[in-house]
C-alpha cells in the first residue's frame, strides 16, 4: 500500500492501539472545548445582566452549523487536508474564546453574540472533521469509531466537572478554560493522522463550495431517507437541550445538573457498547432503536411528576445514551460508508452536521419556543406534561417513516 494510505492501513490493523489512543485524545479535547462553556452559558449571561440575549446566544450554534458546513465543504475538498483545517480552526477559535469574556457586559452584549457566532462558524465544522479523521484513519474497521467517539462524551463531562469544582459555573472564565483547550487541540492536531482531503471532482469552485458531490449522495434513496429522518429527529433533540432543565426543576428535583448528568453517563456507557452492537445488528436496527427511544423518552416526560411518577423522569433522562448514540453515532458511520467510495467523506460529514446540528436544531429551537410560549409564566408539572406529548408523537411518526422507507443494500449492510 502506498505511503499516503499508511494511516488507513494502520487503522485497519487489530494491534493499532496507539492510533486508537491518539484519536480518543482528539475526541476528548474536541468536546471538552464545547462542554466547558456551553452548559452554563445561560447562567453566566444572566449573572452579568445579559439574560435577554440568552435566546440569541443559543441560536448561533445551528446557524453556524449551516454556514460552517458550506465553508468546510469548500476547504476540505479543495485547499486543506482535514488535519490542517483542525489546526487552523482551533487555533483561531482559541484566540476568539479568550476575547469573548471581555464582551460579556451589558453595553457590549450585542457584540458578544456576534463574536460568538463567528467562533461557532469556526468550531462547528470541526465536529465533522474530527469524525472524518477518525473514520478515514480506521479504514474498514469503522466499528472502532464508537469507542473513540465515547471519549468525546467523556471530555464534555470532565469539562463540566472542572468548571463546577472550580466554582466557575457563573463566571466568564469558562471561555478561558475552553480557549486553553482549543489552542491545545490546535497544536495537537498537527500530530494527527495525515488523512487525505476529499479529491476535487473537477467541478467549479462554486460547485465545491456548495458540496454538490456530497448532496449528490442523496440520489441514493436510502441515504436521502436517512438525512431526512436525521434532520427531523434533531428537532426533539433541540427541545431536550433547551427545556429539560426547567422541566426537571418544576418536578421538584433540586439537583437538576446532577440529574441531567445521568443522561451523559448513559451516553458514555452505550458509546462503549456500540462496536459490539454495530457488528451484531448492523446499521438499520441501531438507527431505528435510537428513534424509538426519542419517542419513549418524551412519553416518559409526559407522564412523569414529582410524586409517584418521578421514576419516569429519571428513566427518560437515562435514555439519552440510547437516543443519541444509537442514531447519531451510528449515523456518522453510515454516512462514511456511503461517502467513502465516492471520495467525499469530509463533505458528507459536514453535510450531516449541517442538517442535524444546523437545520434540525434550528427548527427545534423555533418550534420548541412556540410550544413554550403557550405555557403559563410559571409552568406547573401538568403544563410540562402536556407539552412533551408533541415531540413524543412526532418522534414516533418519524420512527415509523424510517422503518417503512429505509432499506440499505447488502453491501452497505455488510459494511
Image (tube, rainbow, N blue to C red):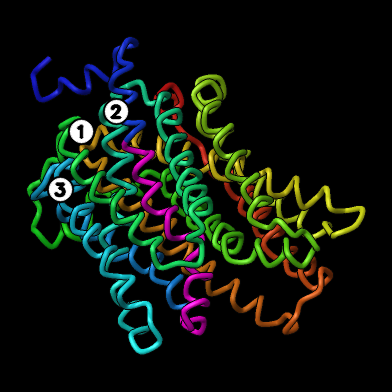
**Foreground residue, 38 or 75?**
38
The residue that label 1 is drawn on is 192
CB under 8 Å between discs 3 and 1: no
Q: Residue at x 66, y 76 (%)?
A: 371
Quadrant of image for the N terminus: top left
Q: State yes or no: discs 3 and 2 in contact (Cβ < 8 Å).
A: no
According to the picture, the residue beneath numbered tag 3 turns out to be 77
Q: Residue shown at 17%/59% (left/top)?
A: 209
Per the picture, the main secondary structure of the magenta-coloured stretch is helix
| Residue at (20, 33) in percent of width and height | 192
Q: Secondary structure at mark 2?
A: helix
**Is 260 on the left-hand or right-hand side of 74?**
right
| Residue 252 percent coordinates (x, y) | 80, 63
Does residue 331 appear in the picture of this structure? Answer: no
Image vertical order of residue 244 relative to residue 21, above or below: below
Q: Residues within 10 Å of mark 1 (few under 14, many from 20)?
A: many
Quick one: which residue is furthest to the top in this view? 15
Tell me which segment is drawn in magenta.
26-54
347 within the magenta span: no
Q: Position of residue 399 (x, y in %)?
A: 63, 48
Q: Report how far apart the C-alphas of labels 3 and 1 lie in the structure.
A: 18 Å
Q: Which residue is mark 2?
A: 22
Q: Considering depth in this image, is 1 or 246 the residue closer to the camera?
A: 246
Among the two numbered marks 1 and 2 on one chain, the one whose residue lies closer to the N terminus: 2
* Residue 276 against residue 229 in the figure, above or below: above
Amino acid at each position: 500500500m502506498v505511503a499516503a494510505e499508511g494511516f488507513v492501513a494502520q487503522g485497519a490493523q487489530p494491534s493499532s492501539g496507539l492510533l486508537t489512543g491518539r484519536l480518543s485524545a482528539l475526541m476528548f479535547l474536541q468536546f471538552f472545548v464545547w462542554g466547558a462553556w456551553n452548559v452554563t452559558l445561560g447562567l453566566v449571561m444572566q449573572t452579568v445582566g445579559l439574560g435577554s440575549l440568552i435566546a440569541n446566544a443559543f441560536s448561533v450554534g445551528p446557524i453556524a452549523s449551516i454556514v460552517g458546513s458550506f465553508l468546510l465543504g469548500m476547504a476540505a475538498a479543495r485547499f486543506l487536508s482535514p488535519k490542517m483545517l483542525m489546526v487552523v480552526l482551533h487555533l483561531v477559535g482559541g484566540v476568539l474564546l479568550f476575547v469573548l469574556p471581555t464582551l460579556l457586559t451589558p453595553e457590549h452584549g450585542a457584540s458578544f453574540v456576534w463574536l460568538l457566532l463567528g467562533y461557532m462558524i469556526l468550531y462547528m465544522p470541526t465536529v465533522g472533521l474530527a469524525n472524518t479523521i477518525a473514520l478515514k484513519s480506521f479504514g474498514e474497521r469503522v466499528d472502532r469509531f464508537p469507542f473513540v467517539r465515547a471519549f468525546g462524551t467523556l471530555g464534555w463531562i470532565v469539562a463540566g466537572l472542572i468548571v463546577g469544582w472550580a466554582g466557575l459555573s457563573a463566571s466568564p472564565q469558562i471561555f478561558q478554560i475552553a480557549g486553553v483547550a482549543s489552542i491545545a487541540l490546535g497544536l495537537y492536531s498537527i500530530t494527527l493522522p495525515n488523512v487525505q482531503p476529499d479529491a476535487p471532482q473537477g467541478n467549479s469552485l462554486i460547485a465545491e463550495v456548495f458540496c454538490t458531490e456530497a448532496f449528490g449522495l442523496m440520489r441514493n434513496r436510502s441515504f436521502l431517507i436517512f438525512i431526512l429522518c436525521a434532520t427531523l429527529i434533531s428537532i426533539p433533540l433541540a427541545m431536550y437541550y433547551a427545556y429539560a432543565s426547567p422541566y426537571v426543576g418544576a418536578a421538584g428535583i433540586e439537583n437538576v445538573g446532577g440529574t441531567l448528568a445521568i443522561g451523559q453517563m448513559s451516553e458514555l456507557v452505550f458509546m462503549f457498547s456500540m462496536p459490539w452492537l454495530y457488528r451484531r445488528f448492523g446499521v438499520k436496527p441501531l438507527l431505528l432503536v435510537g428513534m424509538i427511544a426519542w419517542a419513549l423518552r418524551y412519553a416518559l416526560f409526559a407522564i412523569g411528576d414529582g410524586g409517584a411518577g418521578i421514576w419516569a423522569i429519571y428513566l427518560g433522562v437515562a435514555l439519552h445514551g440510547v437516543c443519541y448514540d444509537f442514531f447519531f453515532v451510528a449515523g456518522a458511520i453510515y454516512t462514511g460508508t456511503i461517502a467513502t467510495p465516492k471520495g467525499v467523506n469530509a463533505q458528507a460529514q459536514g453535510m450531516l452536521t449541517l442538517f442535524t446540528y444546523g437545520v434540525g436544531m434550528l427548527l427545534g429551537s423555533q418550534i420548541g419556543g412556540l410550544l413554550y410560549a403557550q405555557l403559563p409564566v410559571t409552568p406547573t408539572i401538568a403544563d410540562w406534561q402536556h407539552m412533551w406529548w408533541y415531540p413524543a408523537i412526532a418522534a414516533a411518526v418519524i420512527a415509523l417513516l424510517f422503518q417503512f422507507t429505509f432499506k440499505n443494500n447488502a453491501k452497505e449492510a455488510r459494511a
